[in-house]
Image: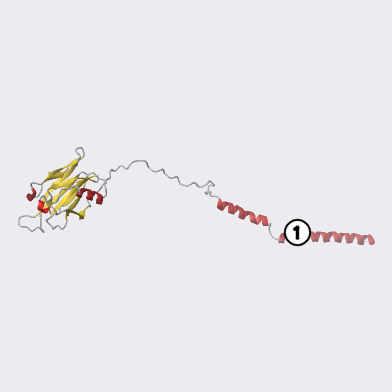
């Protein structure tokens, strides 16, 4: 009887030890996941954010910069409009040949520079005199790549002309003048001349006519 009681006590102690071990195991699991395991993905994510890699895993490359061009500008360009006009005014003959009108000068204030291009072989401007009227002398001034090369007529012809481009090397000028008994303000008459740049000769030529009152005029090429 005593022997059986001893075996029962030993069996009870073994069972108790198993229960305690199970409780401890459950307690360890309840403490939560391993902290190192939780921190590892964050570290990997930080590395991924800092790594300048593309979706394929290759480092991103900065776009290649083209070296500056060493080719010269193909266009032969001269002075801007204001500078070219000042240069021309300093060389042009005066508006009147009469010495009594020597104080009358060309004016840059109302000059028309729309036809000027410093990079084209043959362009123009139109200027008139200071304090002029509708019939005062006006002048078509020609340029070659921004360089002054002459005028449409010498001496200058009265009335503001109509000027248009025919092609790259040709400019058409319509000189205005009064017909019959017309007042100067009407001036319906037109005398048309064309001016063409001659590259081999380095100057321009004229074909056409001047107004009836200016038949003695000549081309003002240089």
Residue 52 in the image, given as x and y percentages of width and height: 53, 49
Q: Nearer the viewer, residue 118 or 60?
A: 118
Residue 194 in the image, given as x and y percentages of width and height: 15, 46
Q: Which residue is mark 1?
A: 25
Q: Residue at x 67, y 57 (%)?
A: 35
Q: Inspect this view and state whether residue 3 appears.
A: yes
Relative to 91, is 38 above or below? below
Relative to 208, is 187 above or below? below
Q: Nearer the viewer, residue 92 or 113?
A: 92
The quadrant in which the N terminus is found is bottom right
Residue 154 in the image, given as x and y percentages of width and height: 12, 47
Q: Residue at x 79, y 59 (%)?
A: 21
Q: Inspect this view and state whether residue 124 appears.
A: no
Residue 78 in the image, given as x and y percentages of width and height: 27, 46
The quadrant in which the C terminus is found is top left
Secondary structure under badge 1? Answer: helix
Residue 65 left/right relative to 116? right
Q: Nearer the viewer, residue 91 or 65?
A: 91
């Amino acid at each position: 009887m005593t022997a059986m009681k001893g075996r029962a006590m030993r069996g009870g102690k073994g069972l108790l030890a198993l229960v305690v071990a199970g409780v401890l195991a459950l307690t360890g699991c309840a403490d939560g996941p391993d902290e190192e395991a939780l921190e590892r993905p964050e570290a990997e994510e930080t590395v991924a954010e800092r790594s300048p890699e593309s979706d394929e895993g290759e480092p991103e490359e900065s776009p290649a910069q083209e070296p500056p061009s060493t080719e010269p500008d193909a266009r032969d360009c001269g002075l801007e409009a204001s500078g070219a006009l000042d240069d021309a005014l300093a060389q042009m003959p005066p508006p009147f040949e009469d010495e009594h009108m020597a104080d009358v000068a060309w004016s840059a204030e109302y000059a028309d520079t729309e036809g000027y291009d410093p990079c084209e072989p043959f362009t123009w401007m139109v200027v008139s005199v200071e304090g002029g009227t509708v019939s005062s002398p006006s002048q078509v001034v020609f340029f070659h790549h921004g360089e002054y090369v002459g005028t449409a007529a010498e001496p200058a012809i009265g009335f503001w002309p109509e000027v248009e481009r025919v092609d790259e090397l040709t400019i058409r000028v319509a000189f205005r003048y009064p017909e019959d008994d017309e007042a100067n303000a009407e001036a319906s008459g037109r005398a048309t001349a064309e001016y063409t740049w001659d590259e081999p000769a380095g100057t321009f030529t004229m074909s056409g006519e001047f107004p009836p009152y200016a038949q003695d005029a000549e081309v003002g090429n240089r």
